[in-house]
Image (cartoon, rainbow, N blue to C red):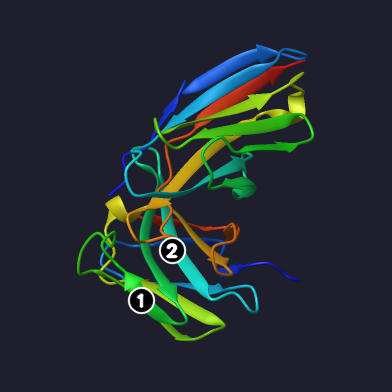
Amino acid sequence: DAGVIQSPRHEVTEMGQEVTLRCKPISGHDYLFWYRQTMMRGLELLIYFNNNVPIDDSGMPEDRFSAKMPNASFSTLKIQPSEPRDSAVYFCASSFGESPLHFGNGTRLTVT
Amino acid sequence: ILNVEQSPQSLHVQEGDSTNFTCSFPSSNFYALHWYRWETAKSPEALFVMTLNGDEKKKGRISATLNTKEGYSYLYIKGSQPEDSATYLCAPSGGGATNKLIFGTGTLLAVQP
């Protein structure tokens, strides 16, 4: 079991550029979550999917953020255009049913 | 939206001390309470999932209790070791969204040798 895999580990981009973060959940897990970690707000839920369908996106900051899950083994979180205040660590997590979440190693995003 | 509070924000103890911290959450529409351990430069790892009032779980020197009627959970560490140094997060779920975990800001524990 390779665990939840996120890529890239680090991303540095300029303001206004499009950023795409990727996540491969653990095989067989039916829930996928995107969290953002900041100093101010801690670990903040952005969106989560069940069986590839978005269930709750109320945490997505604004229209610049979008997330997709085209199949059970892949999800993306896109920011377009990116802004310096988007700088944070973005975590993907997956779970099976109501079992505990398994987190990826995160993507550290820096927008200059 | 669940309002989760954890206290204290940070804690410094000596090796061998026992310690505990608190997670408070709204008791209405409660479903489950998760505890996670988050070491620096790593990702959060699950410790416990509790659902029943009065539940008590144990994993080595770490244990947790749950009071769903009054909306709190305690995490205890007996005989703290330097490797226990981490941020401990709690996350309740409820309100019909049993998988939607809202994390508290955590308690940062530093255990000095």
A69 relative to A18 in the view: left or right: right
Where residue A94 sits, quadrant-wise, is bottom right
For the residues labelled 1 and 2, say whether their Cβ atoms are less than 8 Å apart.
no
Q: Quadrant of residue B19?
A: top right
Q: Quadrant of residue A49?
A: bottom left
Q: Residue furthest bottom?
A: A71
User: Measuring 77% from the left and 18% from the top, which residue is drawn there?
Assistant: B79
Residue position marked by numbered label 2 in the rendering:
A34
- Percent coordinates x, y for residue A44 in the rendering: 38, 50
Query: What amino acid is at disc 2?
Result: Trp
Return the residue nearer the eye: B56 or B14: B56
Q: Dot 2: what SS? A: strand
The answer to whether residue B24 is seen in the rendering is: yes
The answer to whether dots 1 and 2 both sit on one chain is yes
State whether residue B78 is above or below residue B25.
Answer: above
Q: Which mark is residue B98?
A: none
Image-based side of B106 in relation to A79, left or right: right
Instruction: Identify the chain of the residue marked 1, using the numbered disc in the image.
Output: A
User: Horizontal placement of A84 versus B73: left or right?
Assistant: left
- Picture coordinates of residue B82, whole percent (x, y): 75, 24
Judge by depth and name the residue closer to the eye, A38 or B103.
Answer: B103
Q: Position of residue A24 (x, y in %)?
A: 58, 75
Q: A8 and A51: which one is in front?
A: A51
State the mark number for residue A54: 1
The chain carrying label 2 is A
> Hey, what amino acid is under mark 1?
Pro
